[in-house]
Amino acid sequence: MQAIASAPAKTILFGEHSVVYNEPAIAGAVNKRAVVKIRPSKTDKSVLKSYDLNFEAELDTENKKYTLKKGKPGIIRYILESLFRVHDHSPIEMILSSDIPIGSGLGSSAAVTVATLAALYRYHHVRFNKKSLAHDAHMVEQAVQGIASPLDTMVSTYGGLVYLSRNKKIERFKVNFKAPMVVGYTNKHGNTGKMVKDVRALKNRNPKIVNTVLSSMGQLTNYAKQAILNEDYEKMGELMNLNQGFLDLLGVNTYELARMVYRARECGAIGSKITGAGGGGSIIALCPGKVDKVAKCIAKDDNVLKVRFTKKGVSSRVRK
């Protein structure tokens, strides 16, 4: 018997970091996915393998430990935390495949966590729904990172383009949103947990200033919601550029990210900003009619993905 699950990557359009402090955010699932397969191990050891990531490790699921055979640890802590919470610690073989660049700001850890939990629930015949899965995945991310927004795991679970309100209610956008987007990402990976902690430390040192910034980001997100509902790309681009200014104030920008943000604008993007936690990772650019030109400009020094939003969230099944 083999359990299989997959979950999509995400991009945050508005509200990264401020969402951690109960401000609204807007994010969408994109057409890159993580796939997890679980089957009984042929030995008395639990193993995790990823051929496309050139990774292999032996897992001690009961003690949340691992022995690396090859590759880099990457997102193994999220997998171990998921196994610790759900698995009965019997020997299994896990195969992870993903076309989501690790550490790029596209929610690779959330996609892998959601897919891992869904596959484990299928493997152990545990009944679940999307609401409980999103909650459990958020608990895993919070345990690993110390503090985490539920946004990434919600989007990876439900799919589509969503608005997360201040009281954590999800609203799905019903407009047929086909904004032409380019994602640029650096070889310098961001560390979500570290960046969230750094912003919290900045907030503790300068509460009045940073609280004002976070509140303004929330207000901007609500303006962006109306722009999306009106399919007003020009307004959306303007708000993306303003949002980037707030992220600069929070100290999450880097030279590489700034280079991509401004290069995208110089080549025709009407809006560009960091997406995700920053400190490395990726930017997103809104570029109607200029996708190829913007992608070519960013690719001079960095990596590029052309993405589209997808309504498909998590999927899972059992194969005998």
Image: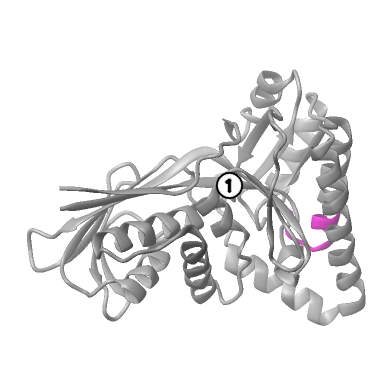
From the viewer's perspective, tell me whether residue 55 is left or right of residue 206: left
- Residue found at x 52% / y 46%: 9
Vertical arrangement, residue 184 with respect to residue 24, above or below: above
Residue located farthest toward the left when viewing the structure as drawn: 43
Where residue 76 sits: x, y (%)?
A: 38, 63
Q: What secondary structure is marked by label 1?
A: strand
Q: Nearer the viewer, residue 291 or 206?
A: 291
Tell me the quarter of the picture where residue 72 sits. Answer: bottom left
- Residue found at x 69% / y 22%: 291
Tell me if residue 103 can be seen: no
Residue where numbered disc 1 is placed:
10
Is residue 186 found inside the magenta-colored segment of the image? no
Range covered by the magenta-colored residues = 246-253
Tell me the quarter of the picture where residue 151 sits. Answer: bottom right
From the viewer's perspective, tell me whether residue 182 is left or right of residue 215: left
- Tell me which colouring the rendered structure shows: one colour
Vertical arrangement, residue 150 with respect to residue 35, above or below: below
- Disc 1 marks a residue whose amino acid type is Lys
- Mark 1 nearby-residue class (10 Å; few <14, some 14–19, many ≥20): many
Where residue 35 sits: x, y (%)?
A: 36, 46
From the viewer's perspective, tell me whether residue 232 is left or right of residue 174: right
Q: Nearer the viewer, residue 268 or 84?
A: 84
Q: Nearer the viewer, residue 227 or 74?
A: 227
- Residue found at x 44% / y 60%: 129
Tell me if residue 307 can be seen: yes
